[in-house]
Image (tube, rainbow, N blue to C red):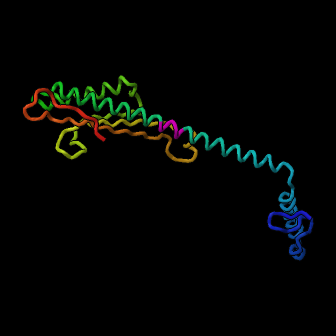
């Protein structure tokens, strides 16, 4: 004899509902309908397939959005590295004792390099700055931070935010020339 999901035989009436009075008939009908639905196995695979397909499509869409974010992070890092290195080289080229003009030249070069590599427009921020080197050796470094706000289409159903900020930071350290050597300081990318 077939049983429902909790082990009750499907064709037996529920004995506890007979003594409830006028409400008992509607309750017996409700129990009977739910029992019929639990015991009915027709088209069960179709329902399971539809639910599974919706889950697979949703997960695939989220994976695609996450993959796009990883690709954008790689592009942002490439441009940040180029801009930091170029800004540090421009700083070295202009540096003749006037730190202000060299700083302006380096920051301008970094911003222009980022623009030449396609990072301009709404939702894209390029922030060049001269900071102390992350190596903590007292040298100056060109820091470029590139942030891109990617729109999220599927994830906005699950999250309150509709954009994904993707940030990359790069440093190019300006190493002063050794005492007694000829030439400008060297530039090295730093992690």
Q: Nearer the viewer, residue 28 or 84?
A: 84
Magenta residues, start to end:
65-70
Q: Is residue 30 above or below residue 94?
A: below
Q: Position of residue 166 (x, y in %)?
A: 42, 39
Q: Nearer the viewer, residue 173 or 79?
A: 173
Q: Residue visible at 60% across and 39% down?
A: 61
Asked which quadrant contains residue 174, the reply is: top left
Judge whether 49 appears above or below 182 on screen: below
Report the residue at 76% width, 49% height from top. Answer: 48
The residue most toward the left is 180
Give the main secondary structure of the magenta stretch: helix
Q: Residue furthest toward the bottom?
A: 19
Percent coordinates x, y for residue 56 in the rendering: 66, 43
Q: What is the number of callouts on the image?
A: 0
Which is more toward the observer, 92 or 15?
92
Image quadrant containing the N terminus? bottom right
x and y, in percent, of residue 68 in the image = 51, 36
Q: Quadrant of residue 95?
A: top left
Q: Residue at x 51, y 47 (%)?
A: 160
Left or right of 71 in this view: 183? left
Residue placed at 49% from the left, 44% from the top?
161
Judge from the rendering whether residue 47 lies leftward or rightward of residue 167; answer left or right: right
Q: Position of residue 183 (x, y in %)?
A: 13, 26
Residue 103 lies within the magenta run: no
Relative horizontal placement of residue 46, taking residue 178 as reference (left or right): right
Work out which quarter of the rendered image holds the C terminus and state it. top left
């Amino acid at each position: 004899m077939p049983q429902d999901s909790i082990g009750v035989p499907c064709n037996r009436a529920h004995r506890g509902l007979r003594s409830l009075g006028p409400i008992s008939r509607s309750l017996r009908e409700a129990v009977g309908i739910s029992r019929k639905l639990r015991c009915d196995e027709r088209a069960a695979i179709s329902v399971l397939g539809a639910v599974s397909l919706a889950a697979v499509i949703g997960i695939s869409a989220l994976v695609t959005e996450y993959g796009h974010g990883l690709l954008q992070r790689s592009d942002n890092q490439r441009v940040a590295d180029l801009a930091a290195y170029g800004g540090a080289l421009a700083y070295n080229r202009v540096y003749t004792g006037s730190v202000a003009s060299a700083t302006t030249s380096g920051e301008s070069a970094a911003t222009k390099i980022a623009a030449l590599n396609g990072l301009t427009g709404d939702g894209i921020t390029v922030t060049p700055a001269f900071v102390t080197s992350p190596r903590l050796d007292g040298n100056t470094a060109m820091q470029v931070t590139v942030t891109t706000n990617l729109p999220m289409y599927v994830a906005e159903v699950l999250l309150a935010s509709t954009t994904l900020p993707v940030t990359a930071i790069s440093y190019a350290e300006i190493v002063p020339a050794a005492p007694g050597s000829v030439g400008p300081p060297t530039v090295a990318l730093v992690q």
